[in-house]
Amino acid sequence: MATTMEGPPLKRPRGNVGAIVAYPTDDSATELRTSSLPSPTMQLSGHKGSVYAVEYSPSGATLLSCSFDKKCLLWSHTEGYHNFNVLEGHKNAVLDCAWLSEETVATASADKTVMLWDVETGTRLRKWDEHSGIVNAVTCIPATSGSSSIINSIFSASDDGSVMQWDQRQKSSVACFETEFPILGVAACASSGHVFSAGIDPAIKCWDVSMQRPVYAVKGHADTVTCLAVSPAGTHLLSNSMDQTVKCWDIQNFTAGNRLQKTLTGHKHNAERGLLKCSWSAGGNMVSAGSADKMVHVWDEFSGEELYLLPGHKGCVNAVTFHPVENVVVSAGSDKQIFVGELS
């Protein structure tokens, strides 16, 4: 039975920019449908350049996509992926995005800025420009995440070798964590109050935000780390690397011994050395990673078995994300396309 999802009503301040292609299935497969999507697979078009990031809002009502074309497109999951708004203001490629709440989202750009947006109106709420290099990644800890000292915080990672912490109420950064090398990935854990960073230096560093100091570093990757992602339970960290591996690390406090839990293989990085992302499913039982082989790779987190190898893209798959409620996966590629599909 298809699931339904409740979310806040969305205003429609701007015209439709995107186009949708639905790939129908035969009637005999109707009873096997596992989501509320209008079609088992949908192709979303509208960007004029490579799509670098896709992220669902906390409820899953809205999908945001970011592109080389300097724009972010907002798609309504509850209305069949109607494109209802465009976020414009960055002066270079938009490389990453993260939701702070159902109404606000942060974006990171090659124009060296981090911006915070009101989703319903498309209004820019904040523009932070303290980074001196390209801002490669951004992550948010929503207020609903718990009682940690870092809730309602935004963290950005830059080529200038720093991770900066932002508060939507402040015009300037509230903390800065500095390293010697460009940082490409950043992730934060609300339960521990830690933030993680990695990049050209493949060692993953853990920082205590309240104490503003490094806690530990883990080594295992042999090449640049392009993305980090904390599990929904806050117990494990996923890292995607140009050494052609995705690794899973135990980040629980007081963990004894080697924090490396498993290594996943099958996806590819290529000479373009793109910032390929990685992600967890809402239940933490599946993980995925961007891949230069034009395929969407989905693994079982427990066994490391590759569960799905999904075709469709004609260019590098830069990002994959899972719906927070439904059995749906979304991929974004250098072919300018976004695919939305249900997992059987």
Image: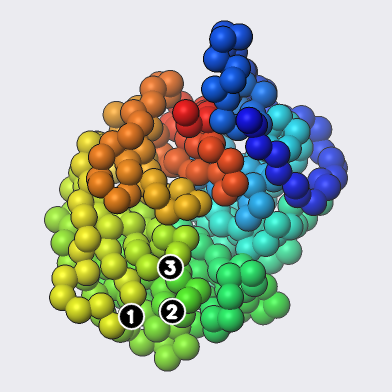
Task: State the CA–CA distance, disc 2 to disc 1.
Answer: 8 Å
Q: Relative to residue 107, is residue 195 depicted above or below?
A: below
Residues at discs 3 and 2 in contact (Cβ within 8 Å)? yes
* Camera-nearest residue between 313 and 237: 237
Left or right of residue 53: residue 120: right
Residues at discs 1 and 3 in contact (Cβ within 8 Å)? no
Image mark for residue 234: 3
- The three-letter amino acid code for the residue at tag 2 is Ser
Residue underneath mark 2: 192
**Residue at left offset 54%, top offset 22%:** 32
Give percent across and percent down for residue 130: 53, 72
- The three-letter amino acid code for the residue at tag 3 is Gly
**Residue at left offset 43%, top offset 68%:** 234
Image quadrant in which you'd find residue 153:
bottom right
Q: Residues within 10 Å of mark 3 (few under 14, many from 20)?
A: some
* Camera-nearest residue between 78 and 92: 78
First along the sequence among labels 2 and 1: 2
Task: State the CA–CA distance, disc 1 to disc 3.
Answer: 11 Å
Residue underneath mark 1: 253
Q: Residues within 10 Å of mark 2 (few under 14, many from 20)?
A: some
**Residue at left offset 75%, top offset 47%:** 6
First along the sequence among labels 3 and 2: 2
Determine whether the residue tagged by mark 1 lies in a helix, strand or loop.
Answer: loop
Residue 133 appears in the rendering: no
Q: Quadrant of the N terminus?
A: top right
Left or right of residue 209: residue 15: right
Residue 313 appears in the rendering: yes
First along the sequence among labels 1 and 3: 3
Give percent across and percent down for residue 81: 68, 32
* Camera-nearest residue between 77 and 16: 77
Give percent across and percent down for residue 58: 63, 55
